[in-house]
Image (cartoon, rainbow, N blue to C red):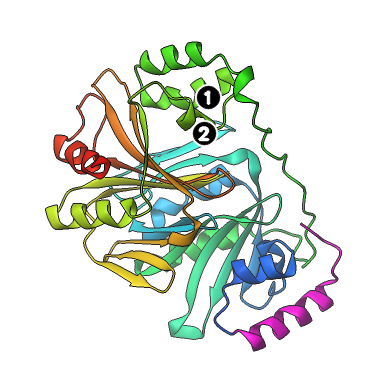
């Protein structure tokens, strides 16, 4: 990520790129120019953009008052948009925050956050207002858009309360540490890892298992105990979503990046293909998946005190997990057997 371009030069390059391709989204513009998306947002400070103090817990705590909003979390391959109210926030930890509601369900990892902006786009009564959060490299982590049902007075109150003294366009970006390189399989205690996997009592402990044995997620798929991970065909995504839609089967869809995991729990109904993107387009839930970015799909079984939990995990060519699907469930309740049957049908 570079910060060497002057704001004048960056603005000129952005305008030229928009002239060539007016439909190019800001995230893609940033990638084309080799800058952080936050740098492009900051170019409009004073013209619809306000820089906020990155007092994350306090800002997130104020969002419930805004009523029904749209939460957006994405990575390069999947965009997850969910409308609802930010309820039951737990934001006391300096490292991890939670919102656990029927509609807005988030896991927040504060360590990578650095920049927050209030953004207004469009004219007067048609203006679109949002709060946008970025990591230390200027990559978008989470965005919150006001809807027609939002309390705009509460939104403007938050913007005014957290407005930063520094309203300059210049941002000091930092490089976040790269993920650890994958160890050779020969250096992994495979037997110990497999025994620990089979002994899991809580699916939330799986990540700790990977850290303990020093595995990447794709490596864990390869070295999983027999019958605990199955590689699937590329068609699995459409097949499982179409089956869930036909059955009105509630699912859980997890999409994340290094600063946020966003979860939808409920049915998926309207499925639409637009070019390279496969989409769920429901009134309160939109999901956009760039199919060509899915390099591997796995059906994964993890033990828990409530029995086996079955998930579908999707990875890009770099081995990054871009999405997970589960059946709707809560701790203390066994997995929905209709979901298990639907997922396991992909093995045939």
Q: Position of residue 207 (x, y in %)?
A: 49, 27
Label 2's element? helix
The Cα atoms of the two marked residues, 1 and 2, are separated by 7 Å
Dot 1 or dot 2, earlier in sequence: 1
Q: Mark on residue 217?
A: 2
In percent of the image, x 36 and y 49: which residue is there?
233
Left or right? Give the position of 168 relative to 17: right
* Left or right placement of residue 185 versus residue 60 in this view: right
> Could you tell me residue 137's position as x and y percent?
71, 52
Residue at left 14%, top 40%? 338
Residue at the image position 31 percent from the left and 21 percent from the top:
303
Q: Residue furthest front?
A: 348
* 41, 243: nearer the viewer: 243
Residue 115 sits above or below residue 9 on the image: above
* Quadrant of the frame with the N terminus: bottom right
Whether pointer 1 and pointer 2 mark residues with C-beta atoms closer than 8 Å, the reply is: yes
Which residue carries the number 1 mark? 210
**Measuring 23% from the left and 24% from the top, which residue is drawn there?**
332
As helix, strand or loop, the secondary structure at mark 1 comes to: helix
Q: Nearer the viewer, residue 342 or 324?
A: 342
- Compared to residue 104, the image places residue 3 above or below, namely below
In this view of the protein, can residue 61 be seen by the observer? no
Residue 186: % across, % down: 62, 19
Instruction: Identify the magenta region.
Output: 1-21
Mark 2 crowd level (few <14, some 14–19, many ≥20, 10 Å Cα): some
The label shown at residue 231 is none
Q: Main secondary structure of the magenta part?
A: helix
Is residue 137 in the magenta section?
no
Q: Position of residue 23 (x, y in %)?
A: 54, 81
């Amino acid at each position: 990520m570079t910060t060497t371009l002057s704001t004048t030069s960056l603005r000129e390059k952005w305008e030229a790129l928009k002239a060539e391709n007016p439909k190019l989204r800001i995230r893609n513009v940033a990638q084309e120019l080799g800058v952080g998306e936050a740098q492009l947002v900051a170019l409009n400070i004073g013209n619809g953009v306000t820089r906020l103090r990155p007092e994350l817990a306090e800002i997130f705590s104020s969002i419930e008052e805004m009523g029904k909003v749209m939460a957006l979390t994405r990575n390069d391959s999947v965009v997850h948009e969910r409308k609802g109210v930010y309820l039951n926030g737990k934001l006391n930890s300096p490292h991890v925050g939670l919102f656990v509601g029927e509609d807005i369900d988030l896991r927040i990892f504060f360590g990578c956050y650095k920049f927050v902006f209030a953004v207004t786009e469009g004219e007067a009564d048609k203006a679109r207002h949002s709060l946008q959060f970025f990591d230390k490299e200027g990559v978008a982590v989470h965005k919150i858009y006001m809807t027609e049902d939002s309390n705009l007075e509460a939104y403007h109150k938050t913007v005014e309360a957290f407005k930063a003294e520094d309203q300059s366009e210049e941002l000091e970006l930092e490089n976040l540490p790269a993920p650890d390189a994958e160890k050779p399989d020969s250096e992994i205690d495979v037997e110990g890892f497999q025994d620990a996997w089979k002994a899991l009592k809580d699916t939330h402990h799986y990540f700790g298992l990977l850290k303990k044995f020093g595995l990447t997620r794709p490596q864990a798929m390869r070295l999983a105990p027999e019958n605990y991970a199955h590689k699937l065909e590329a068609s699995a995504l459409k097949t499982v979503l179409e089956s869930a839609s036909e059955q009105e089967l509630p699912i859980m869809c997890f999409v994340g990046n290094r600063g946020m995991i966003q979860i939808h729990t409920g049915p998926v109904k309207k499925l639409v293909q637009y070019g390279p993107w496969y989409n769920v387009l429901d009134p309160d839930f939109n999901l956009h998946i760039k199919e060509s970015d899915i390099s591997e799909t796995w059906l994964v079984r993890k033990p828990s005190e409530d029995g086996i939990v079955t998930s579908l995990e999707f990875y890009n060519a770099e081995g990054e997990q871009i999405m997970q699907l589960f059946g709707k469930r809560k701790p203390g309740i066994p997995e929905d057997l209709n979901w298990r049957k639907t997922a396991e049908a992909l093995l045939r």
